[in-house]
Image: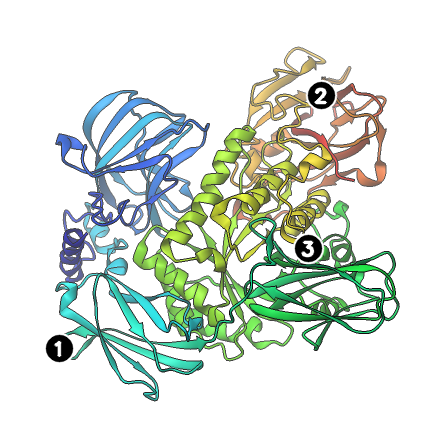
Amino acid sequence: MKHCLALLGVAILASTAGAAVGEGENLLVNGAFDAEQVEFPEFWEPSSAKTVSYYRTGGPEGKKASIVLHDDGTGPGEVNARQHGLVLVAGETYKLSAWIKTKGFKSRHAGLVVHNSGWVDDVGFKDLPADSEWTFMEKTFPLFASSDKEYGLAMFAVDLTGELHFADLKLEAISEGARKGSSSQVSIVAAPRLVPFQPLLNRIPRAAPELALKFYGILPQSQDAYECLVTIAGNPIPLQTVPLAGGKVVVTLAGLASGDYTLEVLLRRRDRVEAVVQAAYSISIIDIPAIDRSNIKQLNNLVAEVLNQPVKNDSAPQTITFVNPRDGWVFVAFTTAAPPPGLTVQIDDRDTAITAATARLEAFRELSLGEHRITVSGSNAEARLLVHSIPEIFDYPPCADSYVKENGSYGWDFMKKHILCAVTTLNGGSLPGDALPEAKALGLKWLANFGVAPVDDPADVQARMEKHPGLTQPQYDGFTSDELFFGRTTIDNYTKALWRLRNPENRRVYTWIVGKPGIASLHTDFMSASLNASKGRGRLLFEAYCHPQADEKAAAAYLDNMIGETMRRFNAFYPNAAAGTGIIFGNFNQIPIISLEHNPAVDFKYYLDMQVNLIANSPDFAGLATTGYWGTYYGDEELARWSFMLMRHYAVEGNKDMLSARYGFKYTPGFLANCDFAAGLNGWVSSPAAEGSVRAETIAGYGKNSQGRWGGGKAGDTVCVMTRNADKPNRISQTVQGLEVGKAYCLQFVTADRNDVVGKKYNPRRYGIDAELDGAEILGDRSFVHIDTRNKGRYEHNDNVAKINLNRIILRAKSPTQVIAFSDEKATPGEELIINFIQLKPYLE
């Protein structure tokens, strides 16, 4: 890697004089795929180690390094290797070139492209043969616009079979305007930096008082020409001169008593006095208690049983000790036939966690690592005391109602009934009236939400953080920074702001993050700053918002990459990152607001169960600090309830089995076929009123713009069109088999006016397509037709578009067989109405 970095250093020096980019300079960092002393080329982000391989030789002429995309036999999905953070100039001219080879190659959509933010537009090489030897390709093009002026480059393939090889990638600025206005990540990754690496700055054990810092960046001389001067403010121990060896500085802190200190480091050349890097960090030397783990029973990745003991029928105080295996949350439960009126359960002689009036006789508390005492008083019946070590459980946002008002209130009463049994930390939202004091009495944390954008200036970000209500108002315990992206170079500005942040009350600062780390210098520094925030209590909250796949096997492979590979990458970049990481799932499925449930053939309840089951069981997530959800108010009432049943099942009770099995839920219930008309009218019995009055059609953007299917690509763009005849209605139907008599089911479907959709006309109203369910028992109090009347949506593409009706019918099966039909009888003659997202799944009562 030294040779590669030296070349990068020359590029930086050449480009800083005059134009931002030199003629012929490669805007891509490490486009030659050099990877000395590492397993994969720096500055490139692979989607998965299973489907993206690196070869040091074997490229053109058998010499150049190459990256190969290939299938792994687990099913369809996207394979890619990417580089982000290119600042380019729209309208100017660029040239992309590469060597490309294919072998048994087949893909629905693949190539090498430059794309804009959000990948709305791209340009590059996408027409590739099935088999070819190494071929040099180049293309000169004017650049399209990007919303934030940032661009990326992607080697990618969707539903890939065979192999797709790439070597020697280059992106050049051709026009003068392109050279003046373009930049890449080179200058950022080249900047020298020392990153606190292990252990956390405020968790340095007095028994082994060492701190390792890693060096990243480009130096004009070899590393052995440099040294690091280390001092502790006030000089309680002598100044140390530590060599920079192997990219690491190891500081010995022997002689410091337990307590807080300021560590000052200065990296310089041995023969010069000026600093290359200078920094100061708050550190803590601590005594870590020795604990006896023999009575700790690990139930799954998330939960350990630390106490399960009978309580005597004796009103006198009974004290029991237990060990908390880490700094973090515990669940305490007192189980008895009837709560004794004088019951108190006190933790460490100062915190009354449970009384006879406590809901469910349960409590959540955050405790330090080590031994703790529980004292039970007033017990007048046989009972048991249970204590579990659990992860932090997150809910965003509390007491925020669904925009689909027919779901009912998600206020404090709803939370007490369905959510508080499995939550420790609330984020955003509101806690009105008695909710705030009750939440505090329950020991819950409440974090405000800090909108981090714009992230252009570290000083501005720092100033806004320090003034934010999360750090200044008494009701909050801190805030979450919303949100950062590994794929954007502005992440470095946030990192600098976080290292400088003044947080005198040591409130929680958690950071929402999108994507996987891929650049060692930039991303390790970011992770270190985020995890060291709040004296080592900071959290990285990974946005695990997972899209459904065609079948359960493909979904499992997707989740391993989306969540499993992310956690593996976190731990590879920063030691034991899981101990400060939150895997936060998306539980938003509410059409037309924002929905991950963009495949009506899939029961999202089961799919969400798969996700939480993965972190509860896969070794990748051992020691995970936090889990939970973002988007509860964007979920329908059924999913909101189910979400926290899953948290209770896995993150409180410590189960390993799928909760769905107890309710008979399946990934694909299989009651209906071709629910989105992607295969035309196949599977449907069509009874048109006239020739051509029932047909299938594709309307580009309908699923995304009007229905709010988030990240679903073209899902929802295929529809069935019914043109109302003056004489009689149109009708389509399917016969459902295999219903369980007496069981409740949810039938959903979406309707709209075709001409409004095509013309992007805002004209909300009730549309005249209805379901016919002869013989079924309709549960009217839970069924509704939601008419979307908003003229603005969550995103700009949802504004001023045609509006939909979300039809939801809860029915109780009276027979194993049920005809489900739809007709446009109530439509106006000549009206063209559309229907899709027809979904039938078991309903959670």
Q: What amino acid type should be assigned to the residue bearing mark 1? A: Arg
- Label 2, label 1: how far apart the Cα atoms are: 85 Å
Quarter of the image where one finds residue 227:
bottom left
The residue indicated by pointer 1 is 272
Q: Secondary structure at mark 1?
A: loop
Closer to the camera in the image, 314 or 182: 314
The answer to whether one can see residue 803 in this image is no
710 lies left or right of 845: left
Q: Secondary structure at mark 3?
A: helix
> In the current view of this chain or complex, which residue is farthest to the top?
691
Mark 3: give few (<14), some (14-19) or many (20+) Cα within 10 Å: many
Placement of the C terminus among the 4 image quadrants: top right
Examine the rendered structure and indicate whether residue 655 appears above or below residue 324. above
Examine the rendered structure and indicate whether residue 115 appears above or below residue 363. above
Position in image of residue 386 (x %, y %): 71, 59
Q: Secondary structure at mark 2?
A: loop
Q: Nearer the viewer, mark 2 or mark 3?
A: 3
Q: What amino acid type should be assigned to the residue bearing mark 3? A: Ala
The residue indicated by pointer 2 is 724
Position in image of residue 496 (x %, y %): 37, 68
Q: What amino acid type should be assigned to the residue bearing mark 2? A: Arg
103 lies left or right of 782: left
- Label 2, label 3: how far apart the Cα atoms are: 50 Å
Position in image of residue 195 (x %, y %): 32, 66
Q: How many marks?
A: 3
Q: Nearer the viewer, mark 2 or mark 1?
A: 1
Quarter of the image where one finds residue 123:
top left
Mark 1: give few (<14), some (14-19) or many (20+) Cα within 10 Å: few
The answer to whether one can see residue 419 in this image is yes
Q: Earlier in the sequence, mark 2 or mark 3?
A: 3
The residue indicated by pointer 3 is 422
